[in-house]
Image: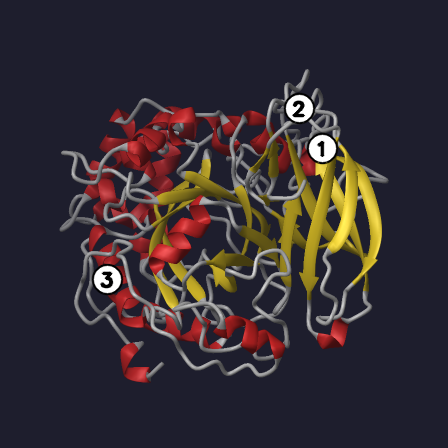
């Protein structure tokens, strides 16, 4: 990939997922894995899964697809981060990622429009702070510029660059949106209202003090007026936008997909994951690993249930992702931060879109790790297991480079529980050699009266979970990876974990009691 093709933007193109023909490319990885890849017509990736970890891209469970590693959540100075967006995709490519997205925050600048308080500066002074974008998020022009950067970096078969945005309500939560032509923000769609801000202790007068000099800019007072007039409050407005055609009068996101970000961090957690069947197929993911943190028990000390249990019990059919949520300048590079493994028919925007819709992905924090899981013969992770068998027979494909062959790990099978996952089976395993042809076989009991889903978690028993749950819980060890959930046909759970009232909620919202519109992130 040449440097001149990654400097962008080189014009704004319609950022949709087009059909692309991916030609056969020379494989750089030698040996049996490369030979296997060469059998796949027109889809071979041009470099190893990770140059530092010698892992094959081919799962033992399905040799027709290739594993790509992705980072789907990153920020730049187009919103509240510090990095130059023209450098971000190059950084992620150089770090060994195959798929990368920029998803700058939207808060209120889209509703305000341009020109005005958030008039876009084509060449912002990188290294300095722009109070407008850092508080109110990316503008329409900034979103358009992101498409230019992505289009300049995108190379089907070699590297897939995606444009997205992060819908960022300070109390409902944050949602990533990918592949849409249109953009929206919470102020437009009911996620930034006077009613909602009041629930977290931010009055209109306090808001005026928070915004400070922005209100003196042209159009600044309009922001407060729009917040006072906005509504109805809640997630319904965003879901309405997500299902609306992009060609509709008000625009919409029906050409894209979306996912729940860092759940339980903002106080109302997407209206306690209130379910909307109209967008079940469009809400494809939930972050379970964000930066270096495992979100399985996020804010357990504040009395919140596991967001994994809350989300899946509510009825959402999401896959699980890991992300870096980068706000600095080293996109994709640090070890130990989240990333997502995606199984692709082809490395292109179309290929990523299809795999995300099918939930063919897993979350990890480890370079070069490959995980794939099948259930009862022919159901892949992320899909619905038919029948009513009282057990899941799981085939687990795992590879993590020759340096870790024989490393002791633990398979945990998680199902629903009273606020926290029930671990119905644990099994000690060791990282297999690439020469082993058979997957790891695990059999777990399933009570379809108690759960409608199951998740495979791969853990390192020698390391602690940095954010543990209840004392003695089996998942208080370190998560190496999470597979996307299996959903169980015909399950009729007799109880639900339901949301709990958080303890110790600060006057201005969550965790540190500091009033913010976008953060905290660092």
Query: What element does badge 2 sit on?
Result: loop
Q: Quarter-wise, where is residue 152 in the image?
A: bottom left
* Picture layout, residue 175 above or below residue 448: below
Task: State the image coordinates of residue 85 (x, y, percent, origin top left).
Answer: 34, 67
Residues at discs 3 and 1 in contact (Cβ within 8 Å): no
Q: Residues within 10 Å of mark 3 (few under 14, many from 20)?
A: many
Up/down of 507 relative to 134, above or below: above
Residue drawn where x is 40% and y is 73% of the image: 158
Disc 3 from disc 1: Cα separation? 42 Å
Q: Which residue lies under the disc numbered 2?
A: 497
Q: Residues within 10 Å of mark 2 (few under 14, many from 20)?
A: some
Q: Is residue 195 left or right of residue 483?
A: left
Task: Locate residue 125: give its quadrant.
Answer: bottom left
Closest to the camera, between mark 3 and mark 2, is 2
Q: Residue at x 14, y 34 (%)?
A: 249
| Mark earlier in primary sequence (3, 1) | 3
In front here: 360 or 147?
360
Give percent across and percent down for residue 154.
32, 68
Q: How many marks?
A: 3
Residue 516 visible at all: no
Check disc 1 and report the residue beneath it. 420
What label does residue 145 carry, if any? 3
**Marks 1 & 2, CB-CB < 8 Å contact:** yes
Which residue corresponds to the image point at 19% horizontal and 72% vertical from the top-left? 10
Can residue 182 be seen here?
yes
Q: What is the residue that sits farthest to the top in this orientation?
A: 494
Q: Position of residue 405 (x, y in %)?
A: 78, 71
Quarter where residue 292 is shown: bottom right
């Amino acid at each position: 990939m040449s440097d001149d093709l990654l400097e962008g933007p080189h014009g704004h193109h319609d950022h949709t997922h087009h059909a692309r023909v991916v030609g056969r490319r020379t494989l750089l990885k030698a040996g049996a894995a490369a030979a296997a890849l060469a059998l796949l017509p027109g889809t071979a990736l041009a470099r190893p899964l990770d140059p530092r970890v010698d892992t094959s891209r081919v799962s033992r469970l399905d040799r027709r697809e290739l594993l790509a590693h992705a980072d789907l959540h990153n920020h730049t100075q187009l919103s509240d981060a510090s990095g130059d967006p023209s450098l971000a995709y190059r950084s992620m490519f150089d770090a060994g990622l195959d798929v990368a997205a920029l998803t700058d925050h939207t808060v209120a600048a889209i509703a305000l429009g341009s020109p005005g308080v958030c008039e876009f500066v084509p060449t912002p002074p990188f290294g300095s702070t722009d109070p407008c974008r850092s508080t109110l998020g990316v503008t329409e022009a900034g979103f358009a510029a992101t498409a230019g950067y992505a289009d300049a970096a995108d190379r089907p078969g070699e590297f897939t660059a995606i444009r997205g945005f992060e819908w960022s309500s300070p109390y409902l939560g944050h949602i990533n949106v990918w592949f849409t032509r249109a953009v929206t923000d919470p102020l437009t769609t009911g996620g930034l209202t006077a009613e909602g801000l009041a629930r977290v202790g931010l009055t209109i007068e306090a808001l005026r003090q928070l915004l400070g000099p922005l209100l003196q800019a042209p159009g600044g007072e309009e922001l407060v007026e729009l917040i006072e007039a906005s509504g109805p409050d809640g997630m319904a407005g965003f879901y309405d936008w997500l299902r609306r055609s992009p060609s509709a009068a008000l625009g919409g996101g029906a050409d894209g997909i979306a996912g729940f970000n860092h759940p339980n961090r903002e106080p109302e957690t997407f209206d306690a994951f209130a379910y909307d069947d109209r967008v079940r197929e469009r809400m494809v993911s939930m972050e379970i690993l964000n930066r270096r943190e495992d979100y399985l028990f996020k804010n357990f000390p504040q009395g919140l249930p596991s967001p994994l249990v809350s989300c899946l019990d509510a009825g959402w059919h999401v896959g699980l992702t890991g992300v870096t949520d980068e706000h600095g300048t080293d996109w994709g590079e640090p070890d130990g931060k989240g990333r997502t493994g995606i199984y692709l028919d082809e490395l292109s925007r179309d290929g990523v879109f299809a795999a995300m819709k099918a939930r063919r992905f897993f979350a990890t924090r480890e370079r070069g790790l490959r995980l794939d899981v099948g259930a009862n013969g022919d159901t892949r992770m992320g899909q619905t297991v038919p029948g009513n068998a009282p057990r899941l027979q799981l085939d687990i494909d795992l590879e993590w480079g020759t340096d870790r062959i024989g490393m002791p790990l633990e398979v945990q099978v998680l199902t629903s529980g009273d606020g926290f996952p029930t671990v119905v089976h644990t099994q000690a395993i060791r990282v297999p050699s690439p020469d082993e042809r058979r997957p790891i076989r695990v059999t777990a009991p399933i009570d379809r009266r108690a759960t409608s889903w199951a998740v495979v978690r791969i853990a390192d028993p020698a390391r602690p979970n940095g954010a543990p749950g209840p004392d003695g819980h089996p998942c208080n060890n370190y998560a190496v990876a999470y597979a996307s959930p299996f959903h169980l046909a015909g399950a009729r759970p007799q109880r639900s974990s339901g949301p709990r009232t958080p303890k110790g909620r600060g006057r201005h919202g969550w965790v540190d009691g500091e009033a913010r519109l976008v953060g905290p992130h660092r």
